[in-house]
Image: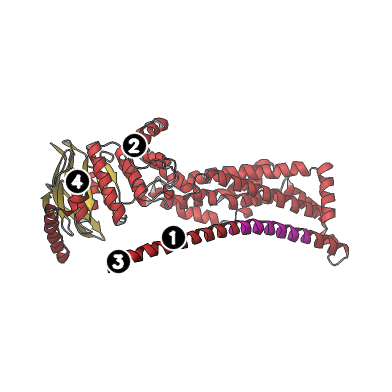
Amino acid sequence: MNKLEIVHNSKTFKKNDKEFCALQETNMSIQSGKFVSIIGPSGCGKSTLFNIIAGLLPPSTGEVLLDGKNIVGKSGCVGYMLQKDLLLPWRTILDNVILGLEIRGVHKTEARERALPMLQKYGLKGFEHHFPAELSGGMRQRAALLRTLLYDKDVILLDEPFGALDAQTRLFMQSWLLKIWSDFKKTVLFVTHDIDEAIYLSDEIYVFSHRPGRIKAKVEVDLPRPRNEETLTQASFQHLKKGLLIMLKVEQEIS
Amino acid sequence: MDANAEKIPVERTGIDQSLEVKKNTRVKAAVIEDDRKGISMRRKVVIGQMIVGVTIIFLWEFLTRIGWLDSYYWSNPSTIVQTGWTAAIQGTLLQDMAYTSGATIIGFILGTLVGSVIGLSFWWSSLYSRITEPYMIAFNAVPKLALAPVLVIMFGIGFNSKVIMAFLMTVIVAALAAYSGVKSVDKDLEKMLFSLGAKRHHVFMKVVVPSSVPWMVSSLKINIALALAGTIVGEFISSRQGVGRMILYAGQVMDLNLVWVGVIVLSFLSIFMYLGTVWIEKWLLKNRKYQ
């Protein structure tokens, strides 16, 4: 069943009376429970697309269907995690994570009770009452993702969540994300620059082209799950990587 | 080759470990030393400050007594204490102090609250804030002390006109500080909150107000001094009570000792109110130590 459908979406910005197209007509349909990645060069309209899906930006044309219902311009229908962790520095980690629940009107005490076991289970045990500035980048990113998860929407958009982390932390975080994904059965839409990351995590990969952004190709990743570090060295992994590299290289040369 | 390759790391680790141990001990020693330095430094500072203070008072007393400074103009510490004591026991010095600090504090609180609300309200509409901003800046530039005669006529010679003076001195400063806070709010934080389904009032309460708090707090210290200046000028223009009125009266009858009493009393009031704002500041920012 299609969880999320993006139908004829496009976005044109006007700047100094000059129109420029950030996103050309885009169609995507994403099945429930899938992990879908989007890769492409900077300026390929990935963030524009995410902002449209999250309801923060109205598209120039088209619709976004969630379970068959149009959610264009409605924010809060999907979980959305931006590139920066965006934790509120004056709140403890626990109080940051419950932000979504609080906005929905859940009482603080109850929200804390719900969030605490999750923090403990997913690697933030002992840091619940610390402030964000006391945590490492990886931990803050985890807290930010748990905040999105606790908001409890079926679809989660992740915009380069591990972009600012070092390689080792990144690998650890990817495995952590896969564990969370299989525990919570969410539909994930994931933006990244990193081909390895995209293949390692996803069921499907959309390759976007440079300005104006549009879908250039869709690649199915049929690597078996559960995946681990060994997946990265398999022949089929390398094969997929090679194909994607060539596609992206062509893209770089055009731009 | 192999044997060497194995040997070298072993030796290295040996050296490294011993080095590390040494480093550790050294670091510890250094830390302890630093602490001691810190303590003795603080002690030296306090002692130094006391010496300077005592010296100034002593010199003031001494130089006026031997006549190098004219004690008619300069008074001297012992006379000031005496005059102050008499004024407190027989006169109305204590009531005057209560009157002045009361007007100052009420004006300060009202000004800060109203100003902060005005400043924060600018977040809600950029049209409204852009229309209003130049007028705020213009009003800030008006020397409000010069308006004192008008205000005294408008609000009477009583307590109210002094509160209004203190209020006017502080309100725009507080508003501009809160507005700077509003302008500095991270747009991505707002976006994140909207993505969690927040309405504007959620964003306002959970992001805009807390992130503006340090800005608002930063204006408190300036504002308490401004409020006191406003009150005193109000009392200068026309008043039946207050330290400002006392100074004005003492000046008119050429009782310069009493003028000095007033100045010293005002200085102490100012210092205490300043310490009060420092305390409020600490209380408001108690969760911010990690920012």
Query: Disc 3 residue type?
Result: Ala
Assess whether mark 4 and mark 2 are in contact (beta carbons under 8 angstroms). no
The residue where tag 4 is placed is: A227
Query: Disc 1 residue type?
Result: Gln
Between disc 4 and disc 1, the foreground one is 1
- Residue B151 in view in this figure: yes
- Distance between the Cα atoms at labels 3 and 1? 22 Å
- Distance between the Cα atoms at labels 2 and 3? 51 Å
Q: Position of residue B192 (x, y in %)?
A: 33, 45
A59 to B54, vertically: above or below: above
- Distance between the Cα atoms at labels 2 and 4? 23 Å
Assess whether mark 1 and mark 2 are in contact (beta carbons under 8 angstroms). no
Between disc 3 and disc 1, the foreground one is 3
Q: Residue at x 14, y 44 (%)?
A: A224
Considering the whole magenta stretch, tell me its main secondary structure.
Answer: helix
The residue where tag 3 is placed is: B3
Marks 2 and 4 share the same chain:
yes
Q: Position of residue A161 (x, y in %)?
A: 29, 50
Identify the subunit bearing mark 2: A
Picture quarter with the N terminus of chain A: top left
- Residue A85 in view in this figure: no
Query: Disc 4 residue type?
Result: Arg
- Distance between the Cα atoms at labels 3 and 4? 39 Å
Q: Residue at x 21, y 45 (%)?
A: A189
The residue positioned farthest toward the front in the image shown: B3
Identify the subunit bearing mark 3: B
Reply yes or no: does residue B193 show up in magenta. no
Marks 4 and 1 share the same chain:
no
Quarter of the image where one finds residue B92: top right
Identify the disc placed on residue B17.
Answer: 1
Q: Which residues are magenta?
A: B34-56
The residue where tag 2 is placed is: A118
